[in-house]
Amino acid sequence: MKFIVLKENLCEGVLLAEKSTGKKTTLPILSSILCSAQNGKILLVGTNLETAVEVWVGGKIEREGSIAIPARVLSSYISLVGGDQITLSSRGENLEVSSDKGKTIIRGCSTNDFPLVPRQEEISRFTLPAGSLRDALRRVVFAVSVSDIRPELASIFFSITPTTTIIAATDSFRLAEQKIQGTFGEKGWSQVFLLPAKSANDLARLLEREEENVLVSLGKGQIVFSTKRFRLTSRLTEGSFPDYKQIVPAVFCTEFNLPKDVIMDTLRVTGLFVSKLHDVIFHVQPSQKRVEVRSANADVGENIASLPATIQGSELQISFNYRYIMDGLGQVEGDVVFGFTSASGPLMIRTRDDTSYFYVVMPMKV
Amino acid sequence: MTNEELWQIVLNEVELAVSRANFITWFKNTSINRTAPGVATICVPNGFTKEWLENKYHKLIMRAIRTNCPEIRSVDYVISTLPQPFIVEKQKEPESVFPEEQLEFQEFSIDTETNLNPRYVFDTFIVGSFNELAYAAAQSVVKNIASLYNPLFIYGGVGLGKTHLLQAIGNAIKQSNTNLQVHYATSERFTNDLIAAIQSHEPQRFKDRYRRFDVLIIDDIQFIAGKTRTQEEFFHTFNTLYENNKQVIFSSDRPPKSIPDLEERLRSRFEAGLIADISQPDYETRLAILQTKLASKKHEFPVEILEYIASVVEKNIRELEGALNIVSARAHILHKMPDMEEVKTLIAQIISKPKWIITASKIIKEVCLFYDINERHLFERSRRREIVKPRQIAMYLLREDFRGSFPYIGQKFGGRDHTTAIHAYEKIAKNIKVDKKLMDEILLLRDRIYEN
């Protein structure tokens, strides 16, 4: 195998493929990247047996062939080394990298043991706008469950109808949902599936600089996202996502809105004084036209901040996990609406005049 | 040779031929199935394994299978959807999450198929004299589905554990036999499903949906009162299930005969099985409930505070829990246990105390309405039975709920002696302990009196 590429292009490809390689696995080859030059295409593959990422890199092929190279060595090397054009060639189980700045030999291994990317038996195919998909994933993925005990909660929920795509995530303490409008399929068609959170993160990263459409191929238990630059194959989570529509509040007992910057700056200060439980107390006082935010830590100190606001509804005192509130605030823009349902019920955070996104979080008991 | 034995032999052979790492990676969580003669299906956990076995180890596997089981001619590979219990690695809960303090979306723990909440089990159900009949009935229904008590009808006041018991039955049945189709629905859900089915012109789907269950549990059945179409549909569903020997379980806040606007044919069906009631827990049970709740929260409380809570919150286990939560939240904020005075003020906020807003005339009016007698008769010196009982009940309520003195009560009822009032009070107080029907009447009366 021998090919010449621009260092920039190769570097980008290697970094994308490296993220999907296996770490701490029984099979050492999973921590390698498969590098192949075949049929006029230079391909980098990384897999951890849950997802596989194939990235195409533009370049000139001089001799076909393939080799597997330890991902960490390759990525660290390629991001540090200078040079503009580099030539990669295989010599037995070694990879030789040469440029006008010098020559390097990296020990690789035979590709015989490298896992094959499963073929896709397609059931349905559609396209999603790459930019919107990436933003949507970023805006919900933080709400997934970090534990694997309930796999459906450690996954992102996709519900696609001809005109709307809904992407949602929840860890049962909070819930984030983003809607994307567009044309996705024929009338009467719909798809529902669960994408593991790790794959969703990989996908968002792969879509970093994509603005066109992503082709989605849905199979039984497996999904493939592809563009001109890459193809991501992931397993799907089995099981069904909880019917979360019933917990999305529609009626609020207390509501106020504040500019995002104002409330975030205030909360950052309050956040310095939260206790080990990370609890901040919101005291909404309609009669005084203000919202009081309090936190206290026996070892650090206390903070009370008061924000003038126009409030609809009744007085309320309620406490939340500081991090959960900040997570949600980070996803909304401009004028932010806080809708409370009761002292022990969920809080909804959303941007005013934007119905495509919302975040719902449960309070704490204290 | 069983499938497991065959696969074990194959695995032993394969293990010798491939490296340890490869063997663990590719043969973990695999199994074999013989579906058709001559065909073996190998179940693999994911697409990667399928691809790898098909392309790299197929010959090896085929050879190993054929030596042990020559009649097999072909092998195919499928991604198995069976849950793999041992690949679920138990992860550490993140430190930031304090399940005790952070509230969850309750609805999420509900099983989407059975609609049951796994939180409700028999183990956490506290049995006392007030609910032992209902509990025993529930237990026997679990053991004798659709044969002993069908339908089972459980009734009792708000927050006394009806839903807990009903869901526990469902969970226990589901646990003992996963093949049985168990479904829990509130009567509101049932009605909504029916309306949705009618709106989308698919009434048949609704029928099919509810008639395929082996165990149907309907909570708060009293809400179908007055809804003619729902009652009709429910009647047919019930009949179908009953005829097919399926278990049906109901709960209600009152016995079938006291549900107003209920069609006679439904009422008689509700009464056909076993009717069990849950009455109010006694002081000892309330204390036991508090202690159990505390144990599950891993908190410690002084005994006198528990005793106080148990003594003042009498009628509702949910309120009992609420009182406990308030005190424990308070203790958490202050980092010390509140003293008795504080506990008293805290509890005072939540216990419903409608007693001082009622009036003597309200009690008398409601008693007369309830027994359909003229108010005038109550004050006469009549000894007719239909008058004596309401009069005694009115006296009892005036004493018990209004806290009127005996001479006052006697005076009120046409200048009777205070001993008459004492006698009436004691008689009713004694009788309600033994006479179920009387107890129900008084409960219903109280509902009416405190309604506004």
Image: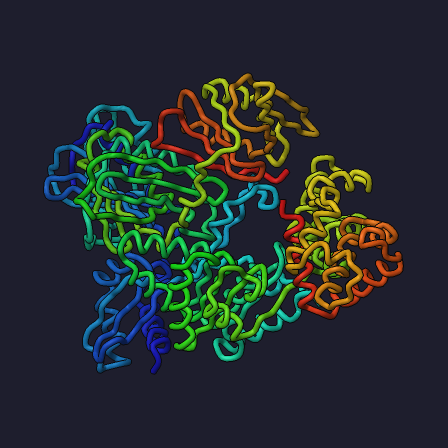
Q: Residue at x 35, y 53 (%)?
A: B195
| A116 lies above or below B278 | above
Question: Quadrant location of the C terminus of chain B?
Answer: top right
Which of the colour schemes (rainbow, by chain, secondary structure, one colour) is used? rainbow
| B213 lies above or below A66 | below
Q: Is residue B186 visible from the viewing direction of this image?
A: no
Q: Residue at x 57, y 75 (%)?
A: B140
* Residue B349 position within the rendered picture, expressed as x and y whole percent measured from the top left: 71, 39
Q: Is residue B431 visible from the viewing direction of this image?
A: yes
* Residue A42 position within the rendered picture, expressed as x and y whole percent measured from the top left: 17, 39
Looking at the image, which is closer to me, B369 or A96? B369
Q: Which quadrant of the structure image shows residue A239?
A: bottom left
Q: Residue at x 66, y 28 (%)?
A: A296
| A150 lies above or below B147 | above
Looking at the image, which is closer to me, A298 or B334? B334
Q: Which quadrant of the structure image shows residue A58?
A: top left
* Residue B322 position within the rendered picture, expressed as x and y whole percent measured from the top left: 66, 46
Number of numbered labels in the structure image = 0
* Residue B138 position within the rendered picture, expressed as x and y whole percent measured from the top left: 57, 70
Side of B178 relative to B14 (left or right): right
Looking at the image, which is closer to me, B297 or B87? B297
Question: Quadrant location of the N terminus of chain B?
Answer: bottom left
Q: Which quadrant of the structure image shows residue B441?
A: bottom right
Side of B49 relative to A324 (left or right): left
